[in-house]
Image (cartoon, rainbow, N blue to C red):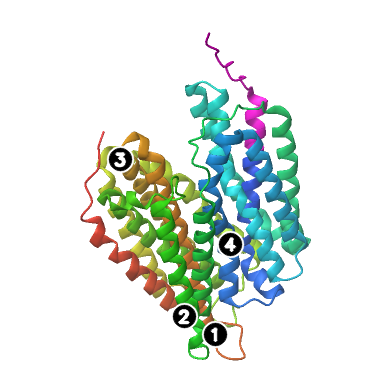
């Protein structure tokens, strides 16, 4: 006698709305640091390199959590894992809100990084409880609301931090996350656990990858002091090499590796990873340097912008980033992935070098940031699309996860390197970096991004509609 599983409970608009509210709240909480980073650096007496570390900590944690969240969701059910992740995020938001110093704030950001695994789990829940056509619409709604929450956080963080305090800019979206999580828990039915591959989670690989990322960030942070502490930096580099070697060895032998490195042997995949890394390095330099340049005193060479004004100036770039995905998708279908990536790279290189040459007016920075955000979205979306369509259907998740992990690595390296450049360019006894350090950062980013064209020209043109 055979038994059949009961069909999953169909969810209504209220449950999808609860997931949307959670997406808005997490998007807002994720975005509050970028426009207020100069304010946080002043209040917590951070160097540019320390500020760079703060700005990437959440994303680095997310890169570690995301590959694990899906496996845990399959094993224990998406709703259970999502609500527990949100409990960690809420704890992180409260730690950030109460943080008296940088180490505690870094801890809060580490815990908040669990939110990066929330969107994939939300998509799993939607697909489990809705027909395919309705699920596509719901996923689009939730994704759009996450982007909208990020824009709201970018705009609201400055006024809240300046009108109330930096503590409230973390506390308010955290309260919204807690409320939305309780609503999801109430309205979303439990989904049955999926099939487990029996191999378990690659905890050792996760631990070694964590050590690799943390050591890499530490090496970049110490780079400006290489003259005074060469032995310390050398020791960190040796530890970094040891972590990388051990991680590669573990991933090659793991039954269910966190990252399947064998996939990197495929030309389409390694080219996508290299391009994504280089393009995200270029993007992240602008993401970090532009707000810093806005905040430099107008008595020097900057604009003395407040956190509120910085959020307003960054908003057009956030809008451009949200539009880049759909535009890239249409471009890939019509012209192929290589044409879209080439366009994005040329646009980004032009914008970065233009910012190095001309940054004396606010609109120079705003337009440059818009072009860079648009170019990044065009390139990364095209890379993910190209990778997903170049491998077997069963390998799609593995291949695209490699690209997404590479994206995080590129972003982290670019931001931390930018912070190191500003720290090295800050005269002794001053807290204002030399203008030449900004120019250096933009030029290096432009040159590095331009080198990606050597790989782009070897890509296949990609499918056209």
- In the image, what residue occupies the spot 33% across and 57% down? 275
Q: Earlier in the sequence, mark 3 or mark 4?
A: 4
Q: Earlier in the sequence, mark 2 or mark 1?
A: 1
- Residue 437 disc label: 2
Q: Earlier in the sequence, mark 1 or mark 4?
A: 4
- Residue 75 disc label: none
Q: Earlier in the sequence, mark 2 or mark 3?
A: 3
Kindly report which numbered mark, 2 or 3, lies closer to the viewer in this rendering: 3
Magenta region includes residue 4? yes
Q: Residues within 10 Å of mark 2 (few under 14, many from 20)?
A: many
Residue beneath disc 1: 426
Q: What is the magenta range? A: 1-21
For the residues labelled 1 and 3, the Cα–Cα distance comes to 47 Å
For the residues labelled 4 and 2, the Cα–Cα distance comes to 23 Å
- Residue 57 disc label: 4
**Is residue 434 at least partly visible in the picture?**
no
Residue 460 image offset from top left, x and y in percent: 21, 47
Residue 435 image offset from top left, x and y in percent: 49, 81
Q: Are marks 2 and 1 in contact (CB under 8 Å)?
A: yes
Residue beneath disc 3: 391
Q: Residue furthest front?
A: 1
Q: Secondary structure at mark 1?
A: loop
Q: Is residue 249 above or below residue 383?
A: below
Magenta region includes residue 25? no
For the residues labelled 2 and 1, the Cα–Cα distance comes to 8 Å
Side of 180 relative to 313 (left or right): right
For the residues labelled 1 and 4, the Cα–Cα distance comes to 23 Å
What is the quadrant of residue 342 in the picture?
A: bottom left
């Amino acid at each position: 006698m055979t038994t059949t599983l009961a069909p999953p409970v169909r969810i209504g608009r209220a449950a999808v709305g609860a997931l949307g509210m959670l997406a808005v709240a997490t998007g807002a909480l994720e975005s509050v640091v970028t426009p207020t980073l100069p304010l946080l650096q002043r209040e917590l007496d951070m160097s540019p390199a320390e500020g760079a570390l703060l700005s990437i900590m959440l994303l680095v944690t997310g890169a570690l959590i995301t590959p694990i969240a899906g496996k845990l969701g399959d094993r224990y059910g998406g709703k259970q894992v999502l609500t527990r992740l949100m409990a960690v995020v809420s704890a992180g938001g409260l730690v950030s809100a109460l943080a008296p110093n940088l180490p505690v704030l870094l801890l809060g950001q580490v815990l908040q990084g669990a939110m990066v695994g929330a969107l994939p789990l939300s998509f799993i829940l939607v697909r489990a409880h809705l027909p395919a056509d309705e699920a596509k619409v719901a996923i689009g709604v939730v994704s759009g609301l996450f982007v909208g929450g990020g824009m709201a956080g970018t705009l609201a963080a400055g006024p809240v931090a300046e009108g109330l305090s930096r503590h409230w800019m973390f506390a308010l979206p955290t309260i919204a996350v807690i409320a939305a999580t309780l609503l999801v828990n109430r309205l979303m039915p439990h989904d049955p656990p999926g099939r487990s591959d029996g191999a378990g989670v690659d905890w050792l690989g996760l631990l070694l990858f964590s050590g690799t990322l943390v050591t890499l960030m530490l090496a970049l942070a110490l780079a400006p002091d290489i003259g005074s502490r060469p032995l310390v930096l050398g020791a960190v580099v040796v530890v970094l090499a040891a972590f990388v070697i051990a991680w590669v060895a573990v991933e090659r032998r793991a039954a269910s590796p966190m990252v399947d490195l064998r996939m990197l042997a495929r030309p389409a995949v390694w080219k996508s990873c290299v391009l994504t890394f280089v393009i995200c390095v270029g993007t992240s330099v602008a993401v970090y340097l532009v707000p810093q340049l806005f905040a430099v005193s107008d008595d020097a060479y900057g604009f003395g912008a407040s956190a509120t004004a910085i959020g307003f100036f960054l908003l057009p770039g956030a809008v451009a980033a949200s539009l880049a995905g759909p535009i890239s998708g249409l471009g890939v279908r019509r012209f192929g992935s290589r044409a879209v990536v080439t366009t994005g790279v040329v646009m980004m290189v032009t914008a970065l070098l233009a910012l190095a040459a001309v940054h004396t007016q606010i609109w120079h920075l705003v337009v440059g940031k818009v072009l860079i955000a648009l170019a990044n979205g065009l390139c990364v979306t095209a890379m993910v699309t190209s990778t997903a369509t170049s491998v077997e259907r069963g390998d799609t998740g593995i291949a695209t996860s490699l690209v997404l992990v590479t994206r995080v690595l590129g972003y982290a390296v670019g931001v931390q390197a930018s912070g190191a450049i500003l720290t090295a360019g800050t005269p002794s006894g001053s807290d204002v970096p030399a203008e030449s350090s900004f120019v250096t950062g933009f030029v290096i980013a432009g040159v590095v991004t331009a080198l990606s064209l050597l790989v782009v020209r070897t890509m296949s043109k990609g499918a056209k509609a």
